[in-house]
Image (cartoon, rainbow, N blue to C red):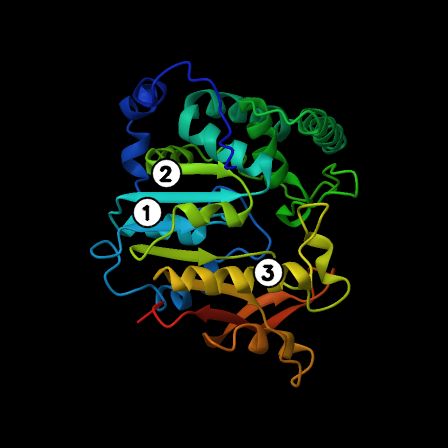
Amino acid sequence: MIKQLQIPLSASFNENIRFAINKKVFERQSIARPFVKWAGGKSQILNDIRLKYPTGLGQTITKYVEPFVGGGAVLFDILNHYKLCEVYISDINRELITTYIAISKHCAELLDMLKSLEIKFLTAHEHMRKEIYYANRDRFNVLKATNNESVELAALFIFLNRTCFNGLYRVNSHGAFNVPQGSYKNPTICDEANLLAVSEKLQNVIIICADYKESRHFIDEKTFVYFDPPYRPLTTTASFTSYTEEGFGDKKQAELAQFISEMSEYGAHIVASNSDPKNIDKNYDFFDCLYSQHIITRISASRAINSNGASRGKISELLICNALGGV
C-alpha cells in the first residue's frame, strides 16, 4: 500500500510565502535546483540524460515518475522546462521525503528554522560549531528514531546535509545518521530563493514515501519514468555512502531490472542510471546481461570510486533506455 506522509497544514501555500513574494525573492529565483547535495547526484550528467528524454514530453507524454528521487536534479529539470499533467516522486528515505513535503507545504516555517540554524552556526567559533553540529545530529536521530515527520526534522536534514562531510547521507546498522562534521567555512544553510522556487514547483507533485514498486499504479503509456537507484558499488569500500540500513544488493538490482521490463510492457518511456562494472573489469557484463533487451549507453562522469573522496576521475556510467525511451 502506498503511504503518503502527512504534515498538518496550518496555512495555505500563498499565505506561507506571501512575505517572500512581497520582497521579490521568488521573482529572482524562478528556476528550481536540487536543495541538497546528494551522493551520485545527476547535475553533472544532466545533458546526457536530457538526450534520452522521450519525444513528445509535455505533449503526448503527460506524466513523469521518479521512484528514487534523491536530490531531484532530473525532477527539477523536468519541472523547470515542461508542463505535465501529473508528476509522482517517491523514495524510501523517510527523512528525505519529509523534507520534500515540508518545502512544499510549510516553506515559510522551514525558512525561519533554517535561518536560525544558519545564524547560530555561522556566528559560532570553530569549537562551538562542532558542538552545534553534533547536538543537532543527536536531535535529528532522536526524531528519526520515532518516524517523526515534522518541519523541525526537515530543517535538521538540510542543516546536516549542508554541514556534514561531503554532503553524505549514511546510516549505521541501527538506522542512525552517523556522518561526521565537514570542514566548510561558510556553508549556505538557508538558500531562501531556491527553496521558494522548489516549493512553487512542488505544489502539484505527488510526494510519496514508498518502495519504487508502488509506482506501478501510476505508470502507463503516457508516462516518462526515470530510475536512479542506489548504484551498484564498484569496489568493496564504495558502498559506504548507502543511505538505508538494508542496502541495495545484486538481488535488488535484478528485481529492479525485472520491474523496468514490466513497466516497458505498459508502454512507458523509461530511462535508468547505474554504475558500470566495466570500470573495474572490462569483461564483467552484470548490467549488460540484466538489461540485454534494452539500450545501454555508456557516458563519462567524474566520480569517486572508493571511500576516499579525493580519489576522483572520469569513469563510465550507464544510461539504460527501453525501446521507447529517448530520441
Q: Secondary structure at mark 1?
A: helix
Q: Secondary structure at mark 3?
A: helix
- For the C terminus, which image quadrant? bottom left
Please state if 12 lies on the left or on the right of 43 as rendered: left
The tag earlier along the polypeptide, 1 or 2, is 1
Q: Residue furthest bottom?
A: 283
Q: Where residue 258 sits in the image (x, y, percent)?
A: 54, 63
In the picture of the structure, the residue carrying the numbered disc 1 is 79
Q: Where residue 22 sits in the image (x, y, percent)?
A: 27, 22
Q: Name the residue: 60% across, 56% down.
A: 230
In the picture of the structure, the residue carrying the numbered disc 3 is 255
Q: Is residue 28 above or below residue 37?
A: above
Query: Residue type at mark 3?
Result: Glu
Proximity of marks 1 and 2: CB atoms separated by less than 8 Å: yes
Estimate the spatial distance between the alpha carbons at disc 3 and disc 1, rounded to whole Å: 29 Å
Q: Is residue 219 visible?
A: yes
In the picture of the structure, the residue carrying the numbered disc 2 is 205
